[in-house]
Image (cartoon, grey):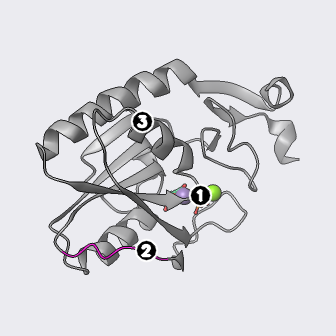
Amino acid sequence: AEHMGKDLERVLVTEEEIHARLAELAQEIWDHYAGEEFLLVGVLKGAVLVMADLMRALPGSAPMDWMAVSSYGSGTKSSGVVRILKDLDTDITGRHVVIVEDIIDSGLTLSWIRANLESRGPKSVEICTLLRKPEAAKVQIDCRWVGFDIPNEFVVGYGLDFDEQYRNLRVVGTLAPHVYS
Ligand code: PRP
Ligand code: MN
Ligand code: MG
């Protein structure tokens, strides 16, 4: 995507790094459940690309479901307000759940989602996120599987958007200043 490349200032994670890490995480997740079924729960929309590549790297079959929540609107700062826009199709009572996310920024979204899912009586809830920003954390989240810790900068690509754009970039990077102005 040549036309999007010049909107990036710097690539933080390459396509190859993403796929190699997701393959490792898929194997770790598979081994963790040791043959017991687990449900992958993706958080729309950012987690779409992580889910697609993570699930294809699993050595065997696993079902998936999706939640849509809203916490950011179209801006770049977290409001801390979480709304369910689309709930799970399935009942998770007594099931192992792995929440799949693109990024933990402040942690407010996942902290809320995890508490919400835990209230439904699942057998367990774990989190797998491709990216995490340790310096941006407003709440501590126990996240079992993390792809990469990154600096506290606004990043786009591989599912992450700026005003709904750039989700389809194959890399994760920072935006050039001219894009904001
Ligand atoms: C982004 C991102 C995470 C969340 C992380 O989603 O995909 O879900 O924010 O931020 P937090 O840790 O500060 O809560 P967003 O609300 O922008 O929706 P989107 O996935 O549709 O882009
Ligand atoms: Mn999201
Ligand atoms: Mg977003």
Q: Which amino acid does label 1 sit on?
A: Lys
| Identity of the residue drawn at 76% across and 48% down | 165
From the image, tell me which residue sits under label 1: 45
Q: Which of pointers 3 and 1 indicates the residue nearer the eye?
A: 3
The amino acid marked with disc number 2 is Asp
Q: Marks 3 and 1, Cα distance to the nearest angstrom?
A: 18 Å
Residue 53 visible to an observer of this rendering: yes
Disc 2: which residue: 89
Kind of element beneath mark 1? loop
Location of residue 153 (image quadrant): top right
Q: Name the residue under label 3.
A: 56
- Check the image and name the residue furthest to the top: 16
Distance from disc 2 to disc 3, alpha carbons, whole Å, reads: 21 Å
Q: Where is residue 94 in the image (x, y as percent from the top left)?
A: 16, 72
Q: What element carries label 2?
A: loop
Residue 97 point in image, percent of width and height: 26, 60
Does the stretch in magenta take in 39? no
Q: In this view, does 141 lie above or below 157?
A: below
